Image (cartoon, grey):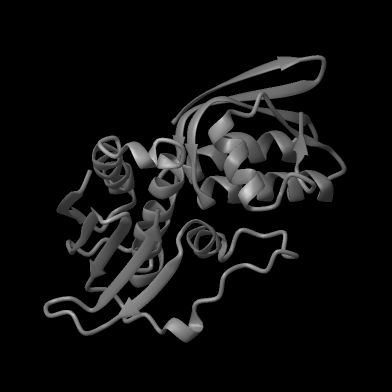
């Protein structure tokens, strides 16, 4: 997994890339959670994520919950077909903010 | 098209990608899997992840796990063997749909994708033996 972070209008966008599994969840959390803890609105762009398993989904859930706890928001953007399939299998499409 | 292959992988989260690629290489040979190849890969990878995370508690051991994949007569069987902590099937609980948390999600995915999930402990030289089956 690789990533890139951009900032615009007080929104941080994290572009994730590649395959997200147990081996890289700590790396993904280390990128996303500090932005949320800094009170920023975070967009997670998933267009280039080819594979995500339950560990990756756990990062999305934890990010969403942390944002709610701190009064900010995480939105999932340009979700790839394969990731959307997994989110829907987990029945999380009504819970997470999908755009 | 029938396929059959097996491979051993170090019990290590860094190897999960190799497990997935092993499965993809086989599944690509089966036209029936074209629409749900990645779901099948996910089920196998979640089972492999459970070995790393639960049977070995995420700790390095030097052990390997064995993955066997067979597709014959429209039945896909994926078997995983490990020498970690013995699995107590009664203790494995998939996540409830109402829970907004990740715990048990992998087991939930496996149950959604596969038709049958069976734990056995009677295989020589191994402690845990998981058999995932799907009929086409």
Indicate the quadrant containing the N terminus of chain B: top left, top right, bottom left or bottom right: top left
Farthest-out residue, front: B73
Q: Residue at x 12, y 80 (%)?
A: B124
Q: Nearer the viewer, residue A30 or B35?
A: B35
**Residue A63: x and y, percent?**
69, 44
**Callout count:** 0
Location of residue B95 in the rendering, given as x and y in whole percent from the top left corner = 62, 67
Relative side of B82 to A80, left or right: left
Residue sitting at x 57%, y 37%: A83
Q: Is residue A34 above or below residue B73?
A: above
Out of B85 and B40, give the one closest to the viewer. Answer: B40
Residue B31 picture location, percent across and down: 33, 36
Q: Indicate the quadrant where residue A60 lies.
A: top right
Would you identify the image quadrant in which residue A6 lies?
top right
Residue at 39% x, 59% y is B135
Q: Which residue is painted at 16% across and 54% down in the image?
A: B6
Q: Is residue A87 above or below residue B123?
A: above
Pick whichever, B46 or B73, lies toward us: B73
- How far across and down, in percent of the image, does residue B26 sit? 24, 41
Asked if residue B104 is positioned above or below residue A7 in the image, the reply reads: below
Residue that sits furthest to the right in the current view: A71
Q: In the figure, is residue A28 to the left or right of B123?
A: right
Name the residue furthest left. Answer: B125
Along the line of sight, which residue is nearer the eye, A69 or B108? Answer: B108
Q: Is residue A3 above or below residue A51?
A: above
């Amino acid at each position: 997994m690789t990533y890139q972070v951009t900032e615009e209008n007080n929104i941080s966008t994290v572009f994730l890339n590649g395959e997200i599994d147990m081996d890289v969840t700590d790396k993904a959390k280390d990128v996303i959670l500090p932005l949320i803890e800094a009170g920023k609105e975070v967009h997670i762009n998933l267009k280039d994520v080819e594979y995500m398993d339950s560990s990756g989904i756990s990062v999305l859930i934890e990010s969403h919950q942390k944002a709610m706890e701190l009064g900010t928001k995480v939105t999932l953007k340009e979700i790839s077909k394969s990731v959307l399939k997994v989110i829907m299998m987990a029945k999380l499409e009504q819970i997470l903010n999908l755009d | 098209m029938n396929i059959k292959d097996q491979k051993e992988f170090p019990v290590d989260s860094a190897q999960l990608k190799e497990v997935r690629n092993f499965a993809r290489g086989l599944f690509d040979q089966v036209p029936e899997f074209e629409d749900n190849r990645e779901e099948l890969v996910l089920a196998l990878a979640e089972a492999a992840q459970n070995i790393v995370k639960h049977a070995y508690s995420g700790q390095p051991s030097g052990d390997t796990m064995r993955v066997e994949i067979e597709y014959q007569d429209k039945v896909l069987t994926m078997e995983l063997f490990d020498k970690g902590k013995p699995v107590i099937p009664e203790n494995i609980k998939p996540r409830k749909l109402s829970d907004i948390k990740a715990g048990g999600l992998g087991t939930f995915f496996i149950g959604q994708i596969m038709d049958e999930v069976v734990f056995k402990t009677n295989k020589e030289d191994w402690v845990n033996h998981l058999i995932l089956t799907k009929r086409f």
